[in-house]
Image: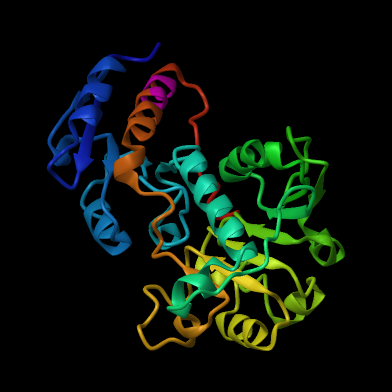
Amino acid sequence: MGPPGLAITIQPEPAHAGLIKAIRVAGGRRVPVGEAEVLVWMGEDAAELSSLLSGLPAVRWVQLPSAGVDTYLPCMCDRQTWTRAQGVYGVPVAEHALMLALACLRGVAVSVRSRQWSPQPSVALTGEDVLIVGGGSIATALLDLLNPFDVRATVLRCHPRSMAGAASVLPMPMLDEVLPCARVVFLCAPLTPQTDGLIDAQRMRLMRSDACLVNVARGRLVVTDDLVGCLSTGQITAAGLDVTDPEPLPSDHPLWRLPNCIITAHSAGELGRCMPAFVQLVENNIRRWRNGEQLIGQVDITLGY
C-alpha cells in the first residue's frame, strides 16, 4: 500500500458530505486546493476546470463527475491521469432509454399533444429486434431491463465480447448491415470523431420505416437536420431524444413541433440522484490509486473515452 494521507481536494466548493467521508475512509486527506495531488471535480464548465488546473502543477489525477468526457478532452494532457464516472449513470439512463422507446412505439407524444381523445395503435416491444450502439454500462443495464421483453438484442461496440442478454455483439463497422433489422435503435456510445454524425440521412434510410431512434448518448451522434427531415417524411416512425444538437434546443426548433418526436432535457442521468454511486466510485478509486491498481473509468485520451 502507498503512503497514507493522499492529498485530495474537491472543487468547486461546497463539498458533498459523502465525498468528504469517502476520502477519509479510503485513506485520503482533504486539503486546500493549492496543496492537492488529486482533484475531484464537481463542476460543469470545462473551461473553468482548465483554468484551475493551470495553477495546480502538483495535481496528478483528476476525477470527473460525468461519464462522457468529450467536453473535457481539450484540457486533458498526459501530465495527469483522468477518470470518468464509469458505471455511475448506467441504470437510470437505461431506464430512461427504455421509457423513451416504449413511449415512441405507442405514440405517446401524439396522444399528449392532441388535446382530444386520440387512441393510438398498441405496439409491443416484446419479441422485436433491437440494436444498441455502444457497449458500456448503459448498454449492460439496458440489456438487463430488456430481458423480460424477450427481444433479440444486437450490440455494437469497438471491442466485441459476449454480453449477457445480447444475441450478438458485433464491431462498430457493421452498423450499416444491422440497422435494417432493428425496430428500436438505442444510441449509448460516447461522442468521438468516429461517432460524430454517426446517424445521418443515409443511415436513417437504411432503417425500417417503423423504426424508433432513441438517443441517450450525445446529441451530435445524430445529424439533427437529417433527423427532422426523416421524421417529417415518415422515413422512420419516431425518435426519443434525451440529448440534442444544439443543446439546449432552441424553443423555435422544428424538432419541438414534430408529433413523432419526444424530447427530454438531458435528464436521464442526474448526478444528484446518482451521488451514492459516484461517492462509492471515488472511494474505490482512491484505494486503487494508493495500491497502485488500475483506476475505474480511466480515460484513454487518444480514444476519447
Q: Residue 221: image x %, image y %? A: 59, 68
**Is 212 placed left or right of 64 in the picture?**
right
Residue 71 location, quadrant: bottom left
Residue 49 seen anywhere in this rendered image of the structure: yes
Q: Residue 70: image x %, image y %? A: 47, 60
Residue 200 location, quadrant: bottom right
Q: Is residue 221 above or below residue 59?
A: below
**Is 91 placed left or right of 283 in the picture?**
right
Q: Is residue 123 magenta?
A: no
**Is 225 placed left or right of 38 in the picture?**
right
Tell me what residue is drawn at x 73 percent, y 81 percent.
235
Q: Is residue 224 above or below residue 98?
A: below
Q: Residue 243: image x %, image y %? A: 47, 66
Q: Is residue 285 magenta?
A: yes
* Quadrant location of the N terminus in the rendered image: top left
Magenta-highlighted residues: 284-289
Q: Is residue 244 above or below residue 92?
A: below
Magenta region, main secondary structure: helix
